[in-house]
Image: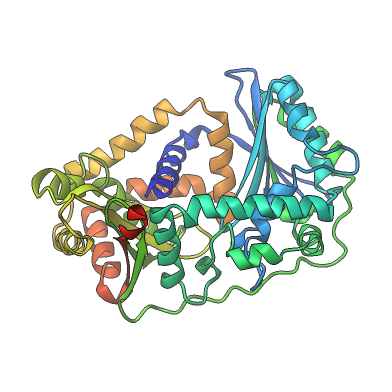
Amino acid sequence: MRRLFLITTVLFFILSQPVYALKVREFHLKNGLKLLVIENHKAPIATFQVWYRIGSRNEQRGKTGISHLLEHMMFKGTKNYGPKTFSRTIQKNGGIDNAFTTKDYTMYYENLSSDRIELAMKLEADRMQNLLLSPEDVKYERSVVMEERRMRYEDDPQSLLYEELIAAAFKVHPYHNPVIGWMDDIASLSADDLRRHYQTYYRPDNAVVIVAGDVSAEQVYELVRKYFGSIKPAKKPLCKVRITREPGQRGKRIVYLKKEAELPYLLMAYHVPSYPERDAAALDVLSTIVSGKSGLLYRDLVRKKKIALSAFASYSGLNKDPFLFFFGGTPVPGKTAEELLEAMKKEIEYLKTNPPTERELQKARNQVEATFIMGQDSIFFQAELVGMFEMIGDWHLIDQYLKDIRSVTPQDVLDVAKRYFNDENLTIGILVPDKRGKDK
């Protein structure tokens, strides 16, 4: 699916940066805020990022989507700056700003010329403590998010199938819930709900500030201490929602989605570990080997057998908890998703009995090397990579991760395919085109 491809491509891109060359300076403020600084003097620009350890994974039952809605509200003004002032001020100073929410965290960023990075600090520190959250603004933005949900999921067959598949694959773990939330939950969120969520999680001891670019680490530390150091530490310990561990799956699950669409669509998902679990590196290498137009799936299912218009594999190991390894694709006109499923399972069985050659492994490593060379000047992705590893445990894991990738053997790839790609661990999603809607 398009969103899945985008996430995987971005992740592959940033994992391939020259991280071994990154020199990260770490600082700590007395109020609990953690600061990471990456000096890169190749261009007079800098990125300022604030990462909060709160995502849909931490939301209470009946309040799904609250982290994403709060992200929207963070642009609606504070006691000191009115609505739309934040983004307008950044843009007037030649910068860009945005934010995103995931299952595990929420991140806000500003990209500016390095001599104006103090402006981002001033504005971010202000909205960490002075957000307005008026009932009128909440009501309006809630309707915006509900419309966003309708357009991005409920009116998009492939995205909706992905959502249904995730919900079926996770019975009790909060990954069951979409980041944007369920429609009924979004509609019920109030200004008081958001204020409690904001006061609980938007605090210095639950945040990490990352600055990268043409800056001095010591000067950045002094400025961050100036703007964020005065924010009082929270009076109460962080309220942590207990995360229920997903029990092992004991049988194949199948989800059928009937929706207006031109063609059927197939998604398959296997429960797999996330980094730093040992098998994560081998799973990442496996996904690189079989993906793309030169990979096994495209070669066999699209070019040779001509049963699919597209075929892919996707894996992201940078989740706080174990997640999923995906296979999927679109059958050619005249073929069903069930036929593609059978063909895909044969390819997966091949992976379980035929280890990759050393040449295939080396090719995957070369792809990683080529990608990081092209992206080595991106300070934003350097900072984002550090933040992603920090959110799953510790930014120091970066170097170990790449060492693990380079040490994967053909036997490791074969072993993970055998260990995880079995029917008891499989959830299948099938999109069934409903032509009746088009005929009306």
Q: Is residue 361 above or below residue 197?
A: above
Residue 177 appearing in the image: yes
| Front residue of 334 and 347 | 334
Seen from this angle, which residue lies furthest bottom?
250
Q: Is residue 249 above or below residue 237?
A: below
Instruction: Locate residue 351: give its quadrant.
Output: bottom left
State left or right for residue 347 relative to residue 256. Answer: left
Instruction: Locate residue 119: give its quadrant.
Output: top right
Counting the numbered discs, the total is: 0
Q: How is the image coloured?
A: rainbow
Q: Position of residue 313 (x, y in %)?
A: 30, 52
Residue 219 appearing in the image: no
The residue depicted at 9 percent of the width and 50 percent of the height is 305
| Front residue of 96 and 383 | 96
Q: Position of residue 41 (x, y in %)?
A: 61, 20
State left or right for residue 169 relative to residue 43. Answer: left
Seen from this angle, which residue lies furthest top?
43
The residue depicted at 26 percent of the width and 74 percent of the height is 423
Q: Position of residue 51 (x, y in %)?
A: 67, 47
The residue depicted at 82 percent of the width and 52 percent of the height is 136
